Amino acid sequence: MPRHVQLWHYTCDHAHAAIGAVGTLHTIGVARYIWLTDLAEPDRDALGLTMRLVTCDRTAHRYRVMGDPIVYRYSDVRLGDFTATERDGLEGEPGALLRHWWIAPGPVPVLYDPIPARAARRIR
């Protein structure tokens, strides 16, 4: 899908160490997609990265998506690619803003782009 919007990937400390400063994101384990967003500053609730189920801070590091990987708006594929149970779990979180969710089947080239200090203070 062609896009004209900058996309970002947020991740935790241990994933950041594995990706490095310049890397390529791939799906891992049972994950079918890489999750991306058009939000340049992370919002835990909007992105569903609330730390209620996963204890690591998945908004600690920001990567800028480079090039033109294959991406889809979550809202465009949610009915065909996700079960009702998956959708309920993802979309049922308070504050979730689906319009900012993008997914990619991978791979996705990225460049580390640290979160500005003022934005980092707001999400902590």
Image (cartoon, rainbow, N blue to C red):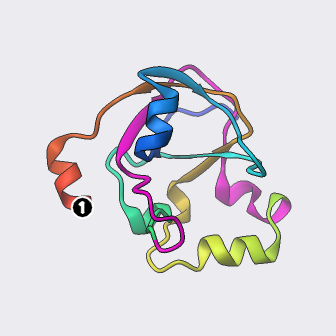
Identify the residue shown where x is 47% and y is 62%: 49
**Residue 15 counted in the magenta span:** no
| Foreground residue among 49 and 67 | 49
| Foreground residue among 35 and 26 | 26
- Magenta extent: 52-80
Identify the residue shown where x is 56% and y is 19%: 67
**Residue 57 counted in the magenta span:** yes
Q: In which quarter of the image is residue 20?
A: top left
Q: Where is residue 29 in the image (x, y as percent from the top left)?
A: 75, 47
Identify the residue shown where x is 66% and y is 55%: 74
Against 105, residue 101 (above or below) is below
Asked which secondary structure carries label 1, the reply is loop
Q: Where is residue 96 in the image (x, y as percent from the top left)?
A: 49, 71
Q: Quadrant of residue 70?
A: top right
Left or right of 55? Residue 119 is: left
Left or right of 45? Residue 69 is: right
- Categorize mark 1 by other alpha carbons within 10 Å: few (<14), some (14-19), many (20+): few
Residue kind at label 1, given as amino acid type: Arg
State the residue position of label 1: 124
Identify the residue shown where x is 20% and y is 60%: 122
